[in-house]
Amino acid sequence: MRPLIVLFIAFFCLTSCAQKKRFLKGETAFQKELNAEYKDASTSPLKNEDRKTFEGLDFFKVDSVYVVNAKLERTPDSKWFNMKTTTNRLTKERIYGVLHFELKGKPYKLNVYQGLELMQREGFEDYLFLPFLDETNGSTSYGGGRYIDLRIPKDDNLTIDFNKAYNPYCAYNDKYSCPIVPRVNYLRTKIEAGVKAFEKH
């Protein structure tokens, strides 16, 4: 969901938000862009009462430990399947590949997905969707897990920056339909990076 909002409207946000001197709280460009999007009524997933008092999302401290180099094991023969969402809607996805990486000296792997509908949109042909769960869910981070946006690399090397992990829109407003993170993408460790849990009004 978010790629359609953030990536597709990135140009709009970078221009109009700057012109209107939108709120740009944040430690990094990613954080500032996300906060600007959430402050803007035309792009924000926040409920009106939350947006009116919004001063910026709560992030874990940026930590280079959570920027990892991953090896992409492509799965070209994977079948399309219906990924469940928080509503009755289903989204057609396939496992594009498996990302193998080390974090704090331990090996992990995550499935990375490609969406059938999204890949047919101009500008998103190489978009990959990385949803994950970890041991911070339900305490310091959103209970339903988080997402990371990626692009298909030219080779088999890909950087995962967990500092850019963000919440599904459902974390802010239950009117949205968000893909449910597959249980296979559970990391048995704390990913203390990216966006933290949000306190709704």
Image: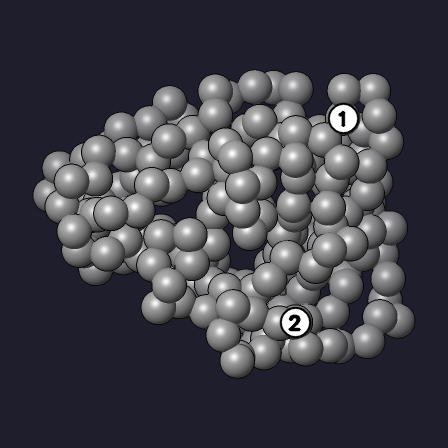
Secondary structure found at label 1: strand
Q: In which quarter of the image is residue 181?
A: bottom right
Please report the residue visible at 53 percent of the width from the left and 79 percent of the height from the top.
89
- Residue under the image location 37 percent in, 31 percent down: 58
Which numbered disc, 1 or 2, marks the residue that appears first in the sequence? 2
Q: Callout 2: helix, strand or loop?
A: strand
Q: Which residue is drawn at 35% across and 68% down?
A: 175
Question: Percent x, y for residue 36?
Answer: 26, 42
84 w.r.t. 155: above or below: below
In the displayed image of the protein, which residue is found farthest to the left?
20
- The answer to which of 84 and 200 lies nearer the viewer is 200
Report the side of 143 relative to 184 (left or right). left
Q: Is residue 183 above or below residue 17?
A: below
Residue 154 can be seen, yes or no: no
Horizontal and vertical percent position of residue 24: 24, 32
Relative depth, front residue between 7 and 138: 138
Is residue 117 visible in the rendered image? The answer is yes
Q: How crowded is mark 1: few (under 14 residues within 10 Å), some or many (20 or more)?
A: some
Identify which residue is drawn at 87% across, 50% down: 73
Report the Cα–Cα distance between label 1 and label 2: 27 Å
Estimate the x, y position of residue 25 in percent, counting from the top left. Answer: 27, 28
In-front residue for pair 189/127: 189
Which residue is disc 2 drawn over? Answer: 83
